[in-house]
Image (cartoon, grey):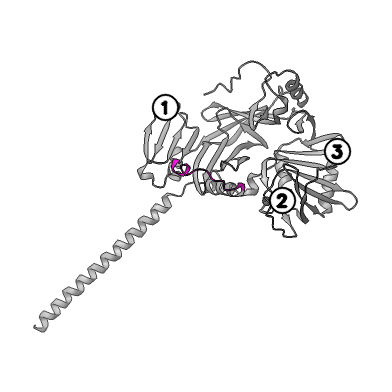
Amino acid sequence: MKLETFKSFLLVVLIGLSLLLTFGIWNYKTEYEQYDQQQLSREVDVGGSEVTKNQIIEPKSIIFHAGEQHLGYENPRENANFFQEMQSWTFTDLTLTDGESPEGYDVELTLPDALPIRIINDPLFSFTNQVEITDNWSFDKIYLTLNPDNSTITIQFLSVDERNQATAQLTNSIVYDQITELLASRQGLTEYVEFEGGAQPIYVRSNTDNVTRRTIAVSHISPDEFVRELFPDEQVVNPQNTPNLNLGKYYNDGTREISISPNERLMNFYNPNASDIGITSIGALTLLQNSIDEVNSHKGWTGQLLSEINSASNEITFRLHYAGLPVYSPNDYSIMKLQFQGQDLIRYNRGLLRLDNEIQNDKSTSLPSGEEVIYHLKNETNDINIENVEDIQLGYDLYYQDDRTVILEPEWFMEINGAWQQIQFEDVPNAQQEEA
Protein backbone atom coordinates (compact mmCIF):
# COMPACT_ATOMS: atom_id res chain seq x y z
CA MET A 1 0.00 0.00 0.00
CA LYS A 2 1.36 3.36 -0.95
CA LEU A 3 2.07 5.83 1.86
CA GLU A 4 -0.35 8.41 0.51
CA THR A 5 -3.13 5.83 0.27
CA PHE A 6 -2.48 4.72 3.86
CA LYS A 7 -2.61 8.32 5.09
CA SER A 8 -5.94 8.86 3.33
CA PHE A 9 -7.37 5.66 4.84
CA LEU A 10 -6.17 6.63 8.34
CA LEU A 11 -7.70 10.11 7.96
CA VAL A 12 -11.06 8.61 7.01
CA VAL A 13 -10.97 6.33 10.08
CA LEU A 14 -10.14 9.20 12.41
CA ILE A 15 -12.90 11.34 10.97
CA GLY A 16 -15.35 8.47 11.46
CA LEU A 17 -14.32 7.99 15.12
CA SER A 18 -14.65 11.70 15.70
CA LEU A 19 -18.16 11.69 14.30
CA LEU A 20 -19.12 8.71 16.47
CA LEU A 21 -17.77 10.37 19.62
CA THR A 22 -19.50 13.63 18.78
CA PHE A 23 -22.79 11.83 18.24
CA GLY A 24 -22.38 10.03 21.57
CA ILE A 25 -21.73 13.26 23.41
CA TRP A 26 -24.75 14.92 21.80
CA ASN A 27 -26.93 11.95 22.58
CA TYR A 28 -25.89 11.86 26.25
CA LYS A 29 -26.38 15.60 26.67
CA THR A 30 -29.87 15.50 25.21
CA GLU A 31 -30.99 12.71 27.57
CA TYR A 32 -29.63 14.58 30.58
CA GLU A 33 -31.43 17.79 29.62
CA GLN A 34 -34.71 15.94 29.07
CA TYR A 35 -34.43 14.21 32.45
CA ASP A 36 -33.64 17.48 34.20
CA GLN A 37 -36.61 19.20 32.59
CA GLN A 38 -38.92 16.30 33.50
CA GLN A 39 -37.85 16.44 37.15
CA LEU A 40 -38.33 20.22 37.20
CA SER A 41 -41.80 19.96 35.67
CA ARG A 42 -42.99 17.70 38.53
CA GLU A 43 -42.28 20.28 41.22
CA VAL A 44 -45.78 21.27 42.34
CA ASP A 45 -46.70 24.34 44.38
CA VAL A 46 -50.42 24.89 45.01
CA GLY A 47 -49.85 28.24 46.68
CA GLY A 48 -49.87 27.18 50.32
CA SER A 49 -46.97 26.55 52.69
CA GLU A 50 -44.88 23.86 54.35
CA VAL A 51 -45.26 23.07 58.07
CA THR A 52 -43.76 21.08 60.94
CA LYS A 53 -45.53 19.08 63.67
CA ASN A 54 -45.33 22.06 66.02
CA GLN A 55 -47.20 24.30 63.60
CA ILE A 56 -50.24 22.10 62.99
CA ILE A 57 -50.86 20.94 66.57
CA GLU A 58 -52.72 23.42 68.74
CA PRO A 59 -55.02 22.97 71.75
CA LYS A 60 -58.69 23.40 70.95
CA SER A 61 -59.17 25.08 74.31
CA ILE A 62 -57.13 26.59 77.14
CA ILE A 63 -58.99 27.09 80.42
CA PHE A 64 -57.61 29.00 83.42
CA HIS A 65 -59.14 27.92 86.71
CA ALA A 66 -59.29 30.66 89.34
CA GLY A 67 -61.16 29.38 92.37
CA GLU A 68 -64.72 28.70 91.24
CA GLN A 69 -64.24 30.70 88.04
CA HIS A 70 -63.27 29.27 84.65
CA LEU A 71 -61.62 31.67 82.23
CA GLY A 72 -60.30 31.60 78.69
CA TYR A 73 -58.77 34.06 76.26
CA GLU A 74 -61.20 36.60 74.85
CA ASN A 75 -59.22 36.57 71.60
CA PRO A 76 -59.08 32.93 70.37
CA ARG A 77 -55.76 33.63 68.62
CA GLU A 78 -54.10 33.82 72.03
CA ASN A 79 -54.52 30.05 72.49
CA ALA A 80 -51.97 29.46 69.74
CA ASN A 81 -49.65 32.14 71.16
CA PHE A 82 -49.73 30.59 74.64
CA PHE A 83 -49.03 27.10 73.29
CA GLN A 84 -46.16 28.36 71.15
CA GLU A 85 -44.68 30.06 74.19
CA MET A 86 -44.97 26.81 76.15
CA GLN A 87 -42.85 25.15 73.48
CA SER A 88 -40.06 27.63 74.20
CA TRP A 89 -39.93 26.64 77.88
CA THR A 90 -37.34 24.11 79.09
CA PHE A 91 -38.66 21.62 81.63
CA THR A 92 -36.66 19.57 84.13
CA ASP A 93 -37.11 16.24 85.91
CA LEU A 94 -39.26 14.47 83.32
CA THR A 95 -40.61 11.28 84.88
CA LEU A 96 -43.14 8.63 83.85
CA THR A 97 -45.25 7.07 86.60
CA ASP A 98 -48.65 5.58 87.28
CA GLY A 99 -51.46 8.01 86.67
CA GLU A 100 -53.05 10.23 89.29
CA SER A 101 -56.22 12.26 88.83
CA PRO A 102 -55.16 15.91 88.65
CA GLU A 103 -56.13 18.17 91.53
CA GLY A 104 -55.64 21.87 92.14
CA TYR A 105 -54.34 22.61 88.65
CA ASP A 106 -54.50 26.17 87.34
CA VAL A 107 -54.40 25.74 83.55
CA GLU A 108 -56.06 22.99 81.50
CA LEU A 109 -55.22 22.51 77.83
CA THR A 110 -57.37 20.19 75.71
CA LEU A 111 -55.92 18.84 72.48
CA PRO A 112 -57.98 18.14 69.34
CA ASP A 113 -57.39 14.38 69.69
CA ALA A 114 -55.32 11.95 71.72
CA LEU A 115 -51.59 12.02 70.89
CA PRO A 116 -48.91 9.40 71.67
CA ILE A 117 -46.87 10.34 74.72
CA ARG A 118 -43.67 10.01 72.67
CA ILE A 119 -44.55 13.24 70.86
CA ILE A 120 -43.85 15.41 73.91
CA ASN A 121 -40.11 15.33 73.21
CA ASP A 122 -40.45 14.67 69.47
CA PRO A 123 -40.67 17.62 69.12
CA LEU A 124 -43.36 19.49 71.10
CA PHE A 125 -41.47 20.34 74.28
CA SER A 126 -37.93 20.61 75.63
CA PHE A 127 -36.56 18.73 78.67
CA THR A 128 -33.14 18.94 80.29
CA ASN A 129 -33.06 15.22 81.07
CA GLN A 130 -33.27 12.96 78.03
CA VAL A 131 -35.73 10.17 78.84
CA GLU A 132 -36.32 7.54 76.18
CA ILE A 133 -40.08 7.11 76.04
CA THR A 134 -41.15 3.69 74.83
CA ASP A 135 -44.67 3.71 76.31
CA ASN A 136 -47.56 3.55 73.86
CA TRP A 137 -50.26 5.34 75.83
CA SER A 138 -51.84 8.58 74.60
CA PHE A 139 -53.00 11.82 76.21
CA ASP A 140 -55.43 14.55 75.17
CA LYS A 141 -55.04 16.97 78.09
CA ILE A 142 -52.16 18.92 79.62
CA TYR A 143 -52.35 20.38 83.14
CA LEU A 144 -50.24 23.20 84.59
CA THR A 145 -50.10 23.69 88.36
CA LEU A 146 -48.55 26.77 89.96
CA ASN A 147 -46.44 26.05 93.04
CA PRO A 148 -46.30 29.29 95.14
CA ASP A 149 -43.79 27.88 97.64
CA ASN A 150 -40.95 27.90 95.10
CA SER A 151 -42.44 29.76 92.10
CA THR A 152 -42.28 26.69 89.87
CA ILE A 153 -44.82 25.12 87.53
CA THR A 154 -45.63 21.42 87.29
CA ILE A 155 -46.72 20.10 83.91
CA GLN A 156 -48.71 16.86 83.78
CA PHE A 157 -49.59 14.73 80.77
CA LEU A 158 -52.29 12.28 81.84
CA SER A 159 -53.23 9.24 79.75
CA VAL A 160 -56.75 9.05 78.38
CA ASP A 161 -57.56 6.17 80.74
CA GLU A 162 -55.74 7.95 83.63
CA ARG A 163 -53.52 4.90 84.25
CA ASN A 164 -50.27 6.59 83.23
CA GLN A 165 -48.77 10.03 83.40
CA ALA A 166 -45.65 12.03 82.61
CA THR A 167 -44.69 15.00 84.77
CA ALA A 168 -41.95 17.63 84.68
CA GLN A 169 -41.05 20.91 86.35
CA LEU A 170 -40.55 24.43 85.03
CA THR A 171 -38.22 26.59 87.10
CA ASN A 172 -38.77 29.96 85.50
CA SER A 173 -39.88 32.78 87.77
CA ILE A 174 -40.67 35.08 84.83
CA VAL A 175 -43.20 32.64 83.35
CA TYR A 176 -44.60 31.91 86.81
CA ASP A 177 -45.14 35.63 87.46
CA GLN A 178 -46.74 36.15 84.04
CA ILE A 179 -49.36 33.46 84.61
CA THR A 180 -49.96 34.58 88.19
CA GLU A 181 -50.49 38.16 87.02
CA LEU A 182 -52.82 37.02 84.24
CA LEU A 183 -55.01 35.11 86.70
CA ALA A 184 -55.03 38.06 89.10
CA SER A 185 -55.81 40.79 86.58
CA ARG A 186 -58.11 38.78 84.24
CA GLN A 187 -56.85 41.09 81.49
CA GLY A 188 -57.64 39.61 78.09
CA LEU A 189 -59.65 36.78 79.65
CA THR A 190 -63.37 36.08 79.52
CA GLU A 191 -65.58 33.81 81.61
CA TYR A 192 -66.50 30.25 80.66
CA VAL A 193 -69.36 28.22 82.13
CA GLU A 194 -69.27 24.49 82.78
CA PHE A 195 -71.58 22.17 80.87
CA GLU A 196 -72.28 19.16 83.07
CA GLY A 197 -73.83 15.85 82.15
CA GLY A 198 -71.86 15.28 78.97
CA ALA A 199 -69.23 12.67 78.20
CA GLN A 200 -66.73 14.82 80.16
CA PRO A 201 -66.62 18.29 81.75
CA ILE A 202 -67.00 20.91 79.01
CA TYR A 203 -66.32 24.61 79.36
CA VAL A 204 -68.38 26.94 77.17
CA ARG A 205 -67.60 30.57 76.52
CA SER A 206 -70.14 32.82 78.21
CA ASN A 207 -69.76 36.18 76.44
CA THR A 208 -70.02 36.12 72.64
CA ASP A 209 -70.31 39.88 72.00
CA ASN A 210 -66.91 40.22 70.35
CA VAL A 211 -67.14 37.27 67.97
CA THR A 212 -67.26 38.67 64.44
CA ARG A 213 -68.77 37.73 61.12
CA ARG A 214 -66.17 37.87 58.35
CA THR A 215 -66.28 38.29 54.59
CA ILE A 216 -63.18 36.91 52.87
CA ALA A 217 -61.96 36.82 49.30
CA VAL A 218 -60.92 33.34 48.16
CA SER A 219 -58.94 31.81 45.32
CA HIS A 220 -59.08 28.21 44.14
CA ILE A 221 -56.40 25.60 43.54
CA SER A 222 -56.43 24.24 39.99
CA PRO A 223 -57.19 20.49 39.84
CA ASP A 224 -54.41 20.18 37.26
CA GLU A 225 -51.88 20.80 40.03
CA PHE A 226 -52.99 17.62 41.80
CA VAL A 227 -52.96 15.65 38.55
CA ARG A 228 -49.28 16.54 38.29
CA GLU A 229 -48.69 15.75 41.96
CA LEU A 230 -50.63 12.51 42.50
CA PHE A 231 -50.11 10.59 39.25
CA PRO A 232 -46.63 9.11 38.61
CA ASP A 233 -46.93 9.82 34.87
CA GLU A 234 -49.35 12.56 33.96
CA GLN A 235 -48.89 11.76 30.26
CA VAL A 236 -51.06 8.64 30.62
CA VAL A 237 -53.80 10.32 32.66
CA ASN A 238 -57.16 10.17 30.94
CA PRO A 239 -59.48 13.11 31.73
CA GLN A 240 -63.12 12.36 31.07
CA ASN A 241 -66.64 13.25 31.99
CA THR A 242 -68.24 11.00 34.55
CA PRO A 243 -71.78 9.62 34.26
CA ASN A 244 -72.32 10.44 37.94
CA LEU A 245 -74.13 13.77 37.98
CA ASN A 246 -72.75 14.51 41.45
CA LEU A 247 -69.20 14.66 40.08
CA GLY A 248 -67.51 17.10 37.77
CA LYS A 249 -64.09 16.38 36.30
CA TYR A 250 -62.64 12.89 36.53
CA TYR A 251 -59.06 11.74 35.93
CA ASN A 252 -57.53 8.25 35.96
CA ASP A 253 -54.39 6.47 34.80
CA GLY A 254 -55.90 3.00 34.81
CA THR A 255 -55.23 2.63 38.54
CA ARG A 256 -55.47 5.87 40.46
CA GLU A 257 -58.32 8.32 40.12
CA ILE A 258 -59.20 11.90 40.99
CA SER A 259 -62.74 13.25 41.04
CA ILE A 260 -63.48 16.97 41.20
CA SER A 261 -66.82 18.45 42.27
CA PRO A 262 -68.82 20.32 39.59
CA ASN A 263 -67.96 23.68 41.18
CA GLU A 264 -64.27 22.66 41.43
CA ARG A 265 -64.24 23.28 45.18
CA LEU A 266 -63.53 19.69 46.31
CA MET A 267 -61.03 17.02 45.28
CA ASN A 268 -61.10 13.29 46.06
CA PHE A 269 -58.08 11.11 45.23
CA TYR A 270 -58.19 7.31 45.48
CA ASN A 271 -55.47 4.71 44.91
CA PRO A 272 -57.21 1.28 45.07
CA ASN A 273 -54.00 -0.70 44.48
CA ALA A 274 -52.57 0.39 47.82
CA SER A 275 -55.77 -0.54 49.67
CA ASP A 276 -56.08 -4.02 48.12
CA ILE A 277 -53.46 -5.47 50.46
CA GLY A 278 -55.39 -4.45 53.57
CA ILE A 279 -54.75 -1.79 56.20
CA THR A 280 -51.94 -2.29 58.70
CA SER A 281 -51.59 0.40 61.35
CA ILE A 282 -48.43 2.46 60.98
CA GLY A 283 -48.86 4.30 64.28
CA ALA A 284 -50.03 7.83 64.98
CA LEU A 285 -46.60 9.48 64.80
CA THR A 286 -45.72 7.89 61.46
CA LEU A 287 -49.18 8.72 60.14
CA LEU A 288 -48.77 12.34 61.20
CA GLN A 289 -45.30 12.64 59.67
CA ASN A 290 -46.35 10.92 56.43
CA SER A 291 -49.21 13.39 56.08
CA ILE A 292 -46.99 16.39 56.74
CA ASP A 293 -44.45 15.16 54.18
CA GLU A 294 -47.14 14.49 51.57
CA VAL A 295 -48.81 17.89 51.85
CA ASN A 296 -45.46 19.67 52.20
CA SER A 297 -44.37 18.13 48.88
CA HIS A 298 -46.75 20.46 47.04
CA LYS A 299 -46.96 23.27 49.63
CA GLY A 300 -50.57 22.37 50.31
CA TRP A 301 -51.13 23.79 53.79
CA THR A 302 -53.65 26.62 53.57
CA GLY A 303 -54.57 27.16 57.23
CA GLN A 304 -55.39 23.63 58.40
CA LEU A 305 -54.65 22.23 61.87
CA LEU A 306 -54.78 18.69 63.21
CA SER A 307 -58.32 17.60 64.02
CA GLU A 308 -58.46 13.80 64.32
CA ILE A 309 -56.14 10.78 64.15
CA ASN A 310 -57.46 7.27 63.52
CA SER A 311 -54.47 4.96 63.85
CA ALA A 312 -56.50 1.79 63.25
CA SER A 313 -57.44 2.87 59.71
CA ASN A 314 -54.38 5.11 59.11
CA GLU A 315 -56.71 8.08 58.53
CA ILE A 316 -55.92 11.61 59.62
CA THR A 317 -58.08 14.72 59.39
CA PHE A 318 -57.07 18.38 59.37
CA ARG A 319 -59.55 21.25 59.67
CA LEU A 320 -59.28 24.80 58.39
CA HIS A 321 -58.95 27.44 61.13
CA TYR A 322 -59.28 31.18 60.88
CA ALA A 323 -58.64 33.87 63.51
CA GLY A 324 -58.20 31.16 66.15
CA LEU A 325 -61.52 29.38 65.50
CA PRO A 326 -62.31 26.14 63.63
CA VAL A 327 -64.15 26.42 60.32
CA TYR A 328 -67.02 24.08 59.44
CA SER A 329 -68.86 23.56 56.18
CA PRO A 330 -71.69 21.16 55.29
CA ASN A 331 -69.84 20.52 52.01
CA ASP A 332 -66.51 19.66 53.68
CA TYR A 333 -64.76 22.60 52.04
CA SER A 334 -62.81 23.11 55.27
CA ILE A 335 -61.61 19.50 55.64
CA MET A 336 -58.42 17.81 54.49
CA LYS A 337 -58.27 14.03 55.02
CA LEU A 338 -55.52 11.56 54.13
CA GLN A 339 -55.24 7.78 54.43
CA PHE A 340 -52.14 5.63 54.05
CA GLN A 341 -51.12 2.01 53.65
CA GLY A 342 -47.50 1.99 54.76
CA GLN A 343 -45.86 4.81 52.83
CA ASP A 344 -48.46 4.65 50.03
CA LEU A 345 -51.18 7.28 49.88
CA ILE A 346 -54.62 5.64 49.50
CA ARG A 347 -56.95 8.61 49.82
CA TYR A 348 -56.52 12.35 49.79
CA ASN A 349 -59.68 14.45 50.05
CA ARG A 350 -59.63 18.21 50.48
CA GLY A 351 -61.25 21.52 49.69
CA LEU A 352 -59.63 23.50 46.91
CA LEU A 353 -60.12 26.99 48.35
CA ARG A 354 -57.51 29.36 49.75
CA LEU A 355 -58.60 32.16 52.06
CA ASP A 356 -57.09 35.44 50.85
CA ASN A 357 -57.83 38.98 52.03
CA GLU A 358 -60.49 39.80 54.58
CA ILE A 359 -62.92 42.23 52.97
CA GLN A 360 -64.85 43.24 56.06
CA ASN A 361 -65.97 42.03 59.47
CA ASP A 362 -69.01 43.05 61.46
CA LYS A 363 -69.82 42.36 65.07
CA SER A 364 -72.23 39.50 65.53
CA THR A 365 -75.23 40.52 67.63
CA SER A 366 -77.38 37.41 67.44
CA LEU A 367 -75.12 34.65 68.74
CA PRO A 368 -76.47 33.03 71.94
CA SER A 369 -74.36 33.18 75.08
CA GLY A 370 -72.82 30.09 76.64
CA GLU A 371 -75.54 29.97 79.28
CA GLU A 372 -78.20 30.05 76.55
CA VAL A 373 -76.49 27.24 74.68
CA ILE A 374 -76.45 25.04 77.77
CA TYR A 375 -80.09 25.80 78.59
CA HIS A 376 -81.10 25.05 75.00
CA LEU A 377 -79.35 21.68 74.91
CA LYS A 378 -80.73 20.58 78.25
CA ASN A 379 -84.27 21.90 77.96
CA GLU A 380 -85.23 22.54 74.34
CA THR A 381 -83.82 19.59 72.39
CA ASN A 382 -85.47 16.19 72.40
CA ASP A 383 -83.33 14.42 69.80
CA ILE A 384 -79.98 14.80 71.61
CA ASN A 385 -78.69 12.49 74.32
CA ILE A 386 -76.77 14.86 76.57
CA GLU A 387 -74.49 12.05 77.73
CA ASN A 388 -73.12 11.72 74.20
CA VAL A 389 -72.05 15.38 73.93
CA GLU A 390 -68.24 15.36 73.88
CA ASP A 391 -67.50 19.03 73.25
CA ILE A 392 -69.09 22.41 72.50
CA GLN A 393 -67.13 25.01 70.56
CA LEU A 394 -67.51 28.36 68.91
CA GLY A 395 -66.61 28.14 65.25
CA TYR A 396 -67.25 29.56 61.82
CA ASP A 397 -69.82 28.24 59.37
CA LEU A 398 -68.34 28.70 55.88
CA TYR A 399 -70.56 29.35 52.90
CA TYR A 400 -70.03 30.98 49.52
CA GLN A 401 -71.45 34.43 48.85
CA ASP A 402 -70.27 34.17 45.25
CA ASP A 403 -67.53 32.23 43.45
CA ARG A 404 -64.78 34.49 44.82
CA THR A 405 -66.12 35.40 48.26
CA VAL A 406 -67.00 33.37 51.34
CA ILE A 407 -68.77 34.28 54.56
CA LEU A 408 -67.48 33.00 57.90
CA GLU A 409 -70.51 33.14 60.16
CA PRO A 410 -69.86 32.54 63.90
CA GLU A 411 -72.01 29.69 65.19
CA TRP A 412 -72.11 27.14 68.00
CA PHE A 413 -71.05 23.57 67.21
CA MET A 414 -71.09 20.39 69.27
CA GLU A 415 -69.31 17.08 68.96
CA ILE A 416 -71.45 13.97 69.39
CA ASN A 417 -69.97 10.48 69.02
CA GLY A 418 -66.93 11.89 67.24
CA ALA A 419 -68.89 13.97 64.69
CA TRP A 420 -69.29 17.74 64.70
CA GLN A 421 -72.62 19.40 63.93
CA GLN A 422 -74.04 22.90 64.19
CA ILE A 423 -76.37 23.56 67.10
CA GLN A 424 -79.73 24.62 65.69
CA PHE A 425 -81.68 27.07 67.82
CA GLU A 426 -84.70 27.26 65.53
CA ASP A 427 -86.65 24.53 63.77
CA VAL A 428 -86.27 26.16 60.40
CA PRO A 429 -83.94 25.25 57.52
CA ASN A 430 -80.59 27.03 57.48
CA ALA A 431 -80.27 28.80 54.12
CA GLN A 432 -76.51 28.63 54.34
CA GLN A 433 -76.56 24.84 54.59
CA GLU A 434 -78.89 24.47 51.62
CA GLU A 435 -76.21 25.80 49.31
CA ALA A 436 -75.04 23.20 46.77
Closer to us: 387 or 328: 387
Contact check, label 1 and label 2, Cβ < 8 Å: no
Closer to us: 263 or 253: 253
Pointer 1 or 3: first along the chain = 3
Instruction: Kindly identify the residue that appears in the image at 72 percent across and 23 percent down.
Output: 365
Q: Is residue 181 left or right of residue 354?
A: right
Mark 2 nearby-residue class (10 Å; few <14, some 14–19, many ≥20): some
Q: Is residue 86 above or below residue 205?
A: below
As helix, strand or loop, the secondary structure at mark 1 comes to loop
Q: Is residue 171 left or right of residue 337?
A: right
Closer to us: 117 or 92: 117
Q: CA distance from mark 3 to mark 2?
A: 24 Å
Q: Amino acid at mark 3?
A: Ala
Pointer 3 or 2: first along the chain = 3
Which numbered tag is attached to residue 66?
3
Which secondary structure type mostly characterizes the magenta part of the structure? loop
Q: Amino acid at mark 1?
A: Asn
Which numbered tag is attached to residue 244?
1
Q: CA distance from mark 1 to mark 2?
A: 48 Å
Mark 1 nearby-residue class (10 Å; few <14, some 14–19, many ≥20): few
Residue under pointer 2: 87
Q: Quadrant of the N terminus?
A: bottom left
Q: Which residues are magenta?
A: 272-284
**Residue 138 in picture, x, y percent from top left:** 69, 45
Instruction: Kindly identify the residue that appears in the image at 66 percent across and 53 percent down.
Output: 122
Q: CA distance from mark 1 to mark 3?
A: 57 Å
Q: Amino acid at mark 2?
A: Gln
**Residue 401 in picture, x, y percent from top left:** 56, 25
Q: Is residue 272 visible?
A: yes
